[in-house]
Amino acid sequence: MTLMSHRPTTSSPTTPWLMPFSREQNGRIRLFFFPHAGGGASTFFQWSKLLPEGVTSYAVQLPGRETRLRDTLHRRIDTVVQSLAQALPPFLERPYVFWGHSMGALLSYEVAQRLQQLGLPLPQRLIVSGMNAPHVPYADPHIHHLPEAEFVSALEDLNGTSPAVLQNAELRSLVLPMLRADFQMVESYAYQEASPLTCPITILDAVEDEKTDEAGLQEWQKQSTELLELFTFSGNHFFLYDHQPKLVNTLGNLLMRQMRQQKGS
């Protein structure tokens, strides 16, 4: 009689809130990308190919775009945070890092805060860009409520949405509701005082970013018990597209450092 051995099979957790990009699902460290307003998970697809070996990457996929086009849009950050805090724990059994840009910086910070309050594992590092500290009042004009022509004009001034999309009526009808919802999330955000995170915060700062200022970025120090770290880049608010090679290199070095610290601990 032939004896057959059966190995237990393990399946990776899945959730519509995360788009997995890495072939290596069990890397030494996991990286979670949080997108800017109007951004989808696909924004970070190319990044995943350039990350160091040993990194498993996921991108947060918000409702109402790309693979979740039919899902109901969220208009408040706290409802997104609540859903992510429920969806993420199965993915946090390995060391991990959050990186959020602009709206994603607020989302990643608030999710980290919620995880800390729940007593769940925190990120090894919170990396943020394109956003002053969460307790610094949002100074930009509110645009989410504007009539369509004025809203489109405001988006054109921000240079974050392709002119080809804004000039095409069919594409506009698809993206404007999503953009309004995302801007409403940012513009209605109300910071709630909380204990500082016990993980370090790293800032990736574009020196020509009109959405941030030195004082507002330094205020992130109040949100962590660890020493703040800051790297500067040329470029404006969307430097993550225009200066990708240098940004990927810096991000890769940060992740490699975290993996070395894990190995030495």
Image (cartoon, rainbow, N blue to C red):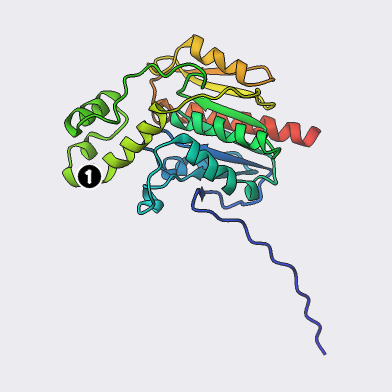
**Where residue 29 appears, x then y in whole percent?**
66, 41
- At x 27%, y 30%, the residue is 145
For disc 1, the marked residue is 173
User: Is residue 52 depicted above or below 150 in this figure?
Assistant: below
Task: Specify whether 82 is left or right of 178.
Answer: right
For this orientation, the residue located farthest to the top is 215
User: Is residue 132 depicted above or below 13 in this figure?
Assistant: above
Between residue 28 and residue 170, name the one nearer to us: 170
For this orientation, the residue located farthest to the bottom is 1
Task: Specify whether 101 is left or right of 264.
Answer: left
- Amino acid type, mark 1: Ser
**Where residue 97 appears, x then y in whole percent?**
62, 35
**Which quadrant of the view contains residue 10?**
bottom right
How many other residues sit within 10 Å of disc 1, few (<14), some (14-19) or many (≥20)? Answer: few
- At x 41%, y 29%, the residue is 186
Between residue 263 and residue 58, name the one nearer to us: 58
